Every structure is written in C-alpha cells, then in structure tokens.
Amino acid sequence: MIDYSKALSRKARDIKPSGIRKFFDMLEGRKGVISLTVGQPDFDTPWHIRDAGIDSIADGHTFYTSNRGTPEMRQELAKYMERRFGLRYHPEDELLVTVGASEAIDLAIRATVDQGDEVIIPVPSFVCYGPLVEMAGGKPVFVESTEDEGFKLTPDKLKAALTDRTKLIVLPYPSNPTGVILEREELEALAEVILETNAVVLSDEIYAELTYGKKHCSIATLPGMRERTVVVNGFSKAYAMTGWRLGYSAAPAPITDAMFKIHQYGVMCAPTASQYAATEALRNGDSDIEMMKEEYDRRRKYLVRALNEIGLPCQKPEGAFYVFMKVGHYGLSSEEFCERLLEEQQVAIVPGNAFGECGEGYARLSYAYSLEHLKEAVKRMERFVRSLNK
Ligand SMILES: Cc1ncc(COP(=O)(O)O)c(C=O)c1O
C-alpha cells in the first residue's frame, strides 16, 4: 500500500488549511443557518456580460487564446485601468490575464521569491499570501496592526520588518477582512520607505472598485513606484464574476515576463469564454459596478449602525464588503464566540484569527448579502449577546 505521508511533499503536508474553510465546513448539512461568511457578491453576473460569454461559445471561440490573454481584452484592460485608476500599462508586454486574482498573486510571489527570501505581509489580511509564499520556499514575515492603528501598515512597522532578504511587500488594500483603505498620503509615507529598498510590491487591488466615498489610489501611481509594483486585480468582486475565474496583473515587462513563463507552464491561458465576457464588462460595465456598490453601501451603513447599537462595536469600513467587529469583550475567544453563535442562534460568521493572530478578539461579517438577510442576522446576534450579558 502506498504510504501517503511519504508520497506527499513536506510543504503540501505541512501547510495549514484555511481558517475560513474550517468554518464553511461546519455549516455543511445544517438547516436554518444565516450565513455571513462568504466573500462573494450575491448579485448575478449582469446579463450583457453573461451574453458575451455565451455568444463567444456559440460563435466557436472554444480554443486556447494568446497565453497572455486575448489582444482585445488586454487593449480594453489598458483603457479601463487608465480610465478608472489613472494607471498606464502597455497591453503587449505589461498585462497578463490570469485565472482569478488568485493566480496573479501566486505568479507574483513565485516570480520574485527564492528559497529563504522574506515577504512582508500586513495582517489581519486575506488568507492566501502566507501559504503561497511558503510553497514558493519563502518566509512570510507577518506585520501585525491593531485597531488603534486603524488596522493599517505604518511606515515604522514596515521599516522595522525590512531586512536584506526582503524581496516582496504585500499591500492588501482595500482590505479583506477589515474594509480599511489606504489614502494617497499614507501610501506616500510607505513608498518613501520602500524606495530605499530593492523590494517589489504586490498590490492586491481586487476591491479597488468597492470604496465608499473616497476613491481608490493605487501605489503604482506614486512617483518611482510603477517600476517595482505588481498591481493585481480581477473580475470576481466588482462585476460579480467569482465563478468565471478571471483576474489580471499589471507590471513592468521584466516582471510580467517572469510571471508569464510560470503562467504558460502552469495554466497556458485563462478560460476563453470568461475573457470574452470580461472584455464586455470592461467596455460596458461601469454602471453595473455603480449599481452594486450603491447597494453594498446601503447595507454597510445599516450593518455598522446596527452592530454598534447591539454591543458589537466596529469601525465603518471604507472599502470591500466586510465588517470587522469586536467580540473579545464578551470574554470568549473569537472561535468560541463564532461557534456558540452558530450553535445557539444559527448565524455563521468568521473568527478574526483566521486572518492572522492579531485578528483574535474580532470576527468578520460579509455584507454581500441582502438587507433582509442582514436584518435577520442582526436580530439573532442581538439575542446572542443579550444572553452573554446575563
Ligand atoms: C483580498 C483578496 N484577494 C484576492 C482574492 C481572490 O480573488 P479571485 O476570485 O479573483 O481569485 C480574494 C477573494 O476573496 C480576496 O479577498
């Protein structure tokens, strides 16, 4: 019989499963649960985008595309990035269409990290960066931030974490799970530190379209930063296209070329029908984004007010579609709080420590759910915290 403990690589064996997944698994088979766990839009992909994907299949576009992505898509992407964020990239050799932002993140890490190299990862943040760095042989250096610091990476903390082995700095803003954004002046202060190094920045801007009030600023637009930044973005969140698995990276040609080689060997090209759909989204999807964003904003305002009223304090998130609320003052760990909330009131949320140890004492709620759904969840959470207060 095969001995799997010997058959599998040490890295694959040792890597920890995602803390978010653990909570999804607990939901399986349960009835009557109100879940606020999932980080994906509850909207359907707009019809004109779906039609473009369907038509592409009907028209026989069922083959591999250019491995960098179709030329039309890259042209549209270049126009979109300039129109929406003031970012200028050459479609020929600086843009790469990938399988979700997820693949672009993996490529940026693998293209820059050698064995033992360090990657700075601000936490709390999305769960994939650390494990992907480990799989690439690198060492994740987690830089914690507290609520008092607004859950933001500060220049001082960044400076303290830098060593001569730092190859990559992840900037995960707007943030999943905190909803925090970094404004231009804050990015400028970080850039001042980064420009003293030879490190590359991986700027995960998947929530760039979903900011409320303040416009997203990409660090790649700051003086000196374009040459050392990989901007990552995708279609999952802004266009409600999670299942189409489409994202992209934008970076200077030497970095894009390195990422492209790995992409060619690993996946060849992103799904063809998805690229046709995404091209339509880039051409005619601005108003869809606005419509969905307005709805998220309504939910955000409701949820923040309601949670603060029932004794679950949270800051007002300025981006993405998550609220990171405090739960530690009830004397339970994040996991205990979430497990008991699930058992006693059938509401599922994600413990904050799934996003880094400094998320202990907090929990993440997604408001990519209908207002009705959110109101029912709040009612049940109120009952739960009342029972804890007794
Ligand atoms: C911060 C962040 N980056 C990347 C991703 C992955 O997105 P995609 O569906 O494009 O792979 C997610 C998904 O939740 C995310 O929250």
Image: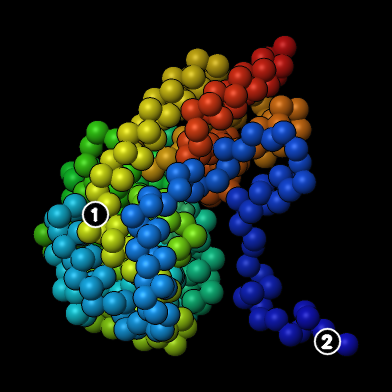
The answer to whether residue 203 is seen in the rendering is no
Q: Amino acid at mark 1?
A: Asn
Left or right: 309 as drawn, with respect to 194: right
**Residue at the limit of the structure toward the front, as seen here:** 58
Left or right: 239 as drawn, with respect to 363: left
Cβ–Cβ below 8 Å for labels 1 and 2? no
Q: Quadrant of residue 331?
A: top right
Q: Tell me the tag on residue 2.
A: 2
Mark-to-mark CA distance, 1 and 2 = 54 Å
- Relative to 52, say whether 123 is above or below: above
**Residue at the limit of the structure toward the right, as seen here:** 1
Q: Picture coordinates of residue 319 (x, y %)?
A: 35, 40
Dot 2 beta carbon under 8 Å from ligand 1? no
**Residue at the limit of the structure toward the top, as seen here:** 390
Q: Amino acid at mark 2?
A: Ile
Residue on which the image places disc 1: 284
Q: Picture coordinates of residue 244 (x, y %)?
A: 45, 63
Q: Picture coordinates of residue 224 (x, y %)?
A: 13, 64
Question: Which circle, 1 or 2, is nearer the viewer?
Answer: 1
Q: Tell me the tag on residue 372.
A: none
Q: Nearer the viewer, residue 268 or 65?
A: 65
Quadrant of ligand 1 in image: bottom left
> Residue visible at 29% across and 77% down?
70
Q: Quadrant of residue 226?
A: bottom left
